[in-house]
Structure formats: C-alpha cells, structure tokens
C-alpha cells in the first residue's frame, strides 16, 4: 500500500468499533482496484459526533461508513439524504461530494440483494422479524419494498416493537403487527424468519433469540449475524432441514454498495472473499 500526499481517506465511525470488518474489506477493495485510498476506523463517542462530521469536511475525508450508535443521529448533520435513507431513518454511508455531505443507506439493498442472490421469494410471503432496532428496521423496509404480505415483529422491548410496526404500517403500507417472543409459539407457519437482534453473536454463541420449537415452523431462516458463521439459531434450522443463510452476504453487499457510491465501481467480490478467508473470517 502506498500512502502519499494524494492518498484519499475513507473510514468508519461508530462506538465501539473494534470488531468491524469494514477496514479489511475496503482496504482490500481499494488495493485490488489499484486506488490510492485508505480506510481507517474512528471510535467516536456520541457527544463528539457533530465535531466528527464537521471534521469530514475540514479534513477532506472522501467517504465514511456510519455504524451503531450513530446511524440515526448523523442525519441532522448532513447536507443531503437519499430517499431510501430518509425512509429508513438511518444513514450508513456518507459521501463527501466536493464539500457537500451526502447520506445513503446500503443496508437495505445489501439485505434485499442477498435474498435475490439466493433465490428467496419475498412477494406475498409472511415474515417474522426478531428485533426492532436499526438492523431490524432495514430488514423490515427491505422485505416491504420486495412485496412481503405481512410482517410480525417480535422484540424484548414492547415499545420498540410497537414503534417499528407502526412505522412500517404508516410508511410502507404493509400489514405489520408486533408481538412478544412468547406469542411466536402460537404461529403455525412462517415463510421467512429473520434474526435482526444481536443475540447469538460472538462471544455469546450459546444463545438463540428463539427456541427450536419456533424455528421448526419456518421455511427459511436468515440470521443477519455473520460471526459466528453458524449461530445457534442457524444450527436449529439446519437440524430441522430448513434452508438458511447467515449475514455474510448482506455485509459484503452493503460494503460493495458503499464502495460504488464512493468510487463509481463495484469491488471484486471473489478477491474480497479470498482475503477474508485468509484472515479466517470465511471458511
Ligand atoms: P442494531 O442497529 O444492530 O439493530 P440496536 O438498535 O441496538 O442495534 O438493536 C439491537 C436489537 O437486539 C434490539 O431489538 C434488542 O432488543 P431490545 O429493543 O429489547 O433491547 C435486541 N437485543 C439485544 N440484546 C438482546 C437480548 N439479550 N435479548 C433479546 N433481545 C436483545
């Protein structure tokens, strides 16, 4: 990697930021596209968010990914926000377009594309989303835009579940209800079951947001967690012979869309996968 006075700076802001795979992915992408650019991570506390965003302009940083907990709060500091990001109420990608900060959301596209790539039909189906945070919102919007018939949101905090279901009903016109985890036992059949909570993520790999008796009702199980590769939830699905997918493709797709917003080109997916394999992130 060459770093000189012409090197363009990109990065990610969030807190905590230590476990992000984005620096690895984007630096590999810059290198394989022969771009004189570098991607670094910035651990930004909530009280410093405004200064950090002003710093993008002041320092001429070319692009920034935004992660938890700043995806929603960052919007008020941007000059332009895409319709999709407005709909979701969250920005995960900022492009510094000659001093104009533009906000986009590539999580939804990343999620929807991964369903398409694996041939998962959404139109007319019923879906259960576990969780009601930012990731669950992106999943709910993605499913709604893909023509899902009904969405059931189950979440630990009832208030957050209600907020998300109301939001989806009002903004996307989809039949959406919120329930408790216990209520899921009453369901007969689930076309698409998506885990959008952090339950089961490393290091808490012995946890699952729902038990096998709920999983067995599903025709397809998607866990947006990618570390571990196979969460306990996905191992239940596997045991029951149910098609399933982890969050790795969503991660790669959202990163590729950010990369394209910044550079105008797609990155080479197989090169990125090989690099992640070498670092033991992919088997
Ligand atoms: P993200 O942007 O990744 O979605 P978030 O907005 O903090 O992050 O949301 C985390 C989600 O995981 C929430 O749905 C949260 O449930 P609550 O709204 O009830 O907090 C869910 N979650 C996290 N830890 C959980 C746990 N131990 N049990 C159940 N749900 C949990």
Image: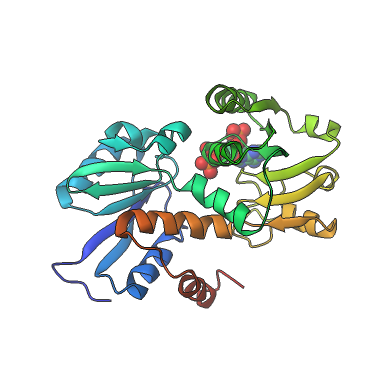
Q: Nearer the viewer, residue 269 or 232?
A: 269
The image quadrant of residue 136 is top right
Location of residue 168 in the rendering, given as x and y in whole percent from the top left corner? 57, 28
Instruction: Tell me if 124 is positioned left or right of 66 in this view.
Output: right
Considering every residue shown, the one lying at the far left of the view is: 5
Is 178 located above or below residue 18 in the figure? above
Identity of the residue drawn at 37% across and 57% down = 260
What is the quadrant of residue 281 in the picture? bottom right
- Is residue 225 visible in this depiction of the protein? no
Report the colour scheme: rainbow
The x and y percentages for residue 258 are: 39, 54
| On screen, residue 115 above or below 28 | above
Quadrant of the drawing holding the N terminus = bottom left
**Looking at the rendering, which quadrant does residue 74 occupy?**
top left
Q: Nearer the viewer, residue 123 or 229?
A: 123
Give coordinates of residue 124: x percent, y percent.
71, 38
Ligand 1 shows up in the quarter that is top right
Residue 65 appears anywhere in the view: yes
Asked whether, in this view, residue 106 is left or right of residue 37, the answer is right
Residue appearing at x 54%, y 42% in the figure = 135
């Amino acid at each position: 990697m060459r770093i000189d006075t012409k090197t363009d700076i990109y990065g990610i802001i969030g807190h905590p930021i230590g476990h992000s795979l984005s620096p690895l992915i984007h630096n590999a992408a810059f290198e394989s596209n022969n771009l004189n650019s570098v991607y670094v991570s910035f651990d930004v506390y909530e009280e410093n968010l405004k200064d950090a965003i002003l710093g993008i302009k002041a320092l001429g940083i070319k692009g920034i990914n935004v992660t938890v907990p700043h995806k929603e709060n960052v919007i008020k500091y941007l000059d332009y926000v895409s319709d999709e990001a407005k709909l979701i109420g969250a920005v995960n990608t900022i492009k510094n377009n000659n001093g104009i900060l533009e906000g986009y959301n590539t999580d939804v596209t990343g999620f929807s594309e991964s369903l398409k790539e694996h041939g998962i039909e959404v139109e007319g189906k019923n879906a259960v989303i576990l969780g009601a945070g930012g990731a669950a919102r992106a999943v709910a919007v993605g499913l709604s835009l893909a023509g899902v018939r009904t969405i059931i949101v189950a979440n630990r905090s009832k208030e957050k579940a209600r907020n998300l279901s109301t939001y989806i009903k009002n903004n996307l016109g989809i039949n959406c209800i919120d329930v408790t985890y216990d209520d899921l036992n009453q369901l007969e059949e689930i076309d698409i079951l998506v885990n959008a909570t952090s339950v089961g993520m490393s290091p808490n790999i012995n946890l699952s947001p729902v038990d096998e008796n709920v999983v067995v009702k599903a025709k397809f199980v998607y866990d947006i967690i990618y570390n571990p590769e196979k969460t306990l939830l996905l191992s239940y699905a596997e045991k029951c012979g149910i098609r399933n997918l982890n969050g790795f493709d969503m991660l790669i797709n959202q990163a590729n869309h950010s990369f394209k917003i910044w550079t105008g080109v797609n990155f080479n997916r197989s090169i990125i996968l090989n690099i992640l394999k070498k670092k033991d992130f992919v088997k």
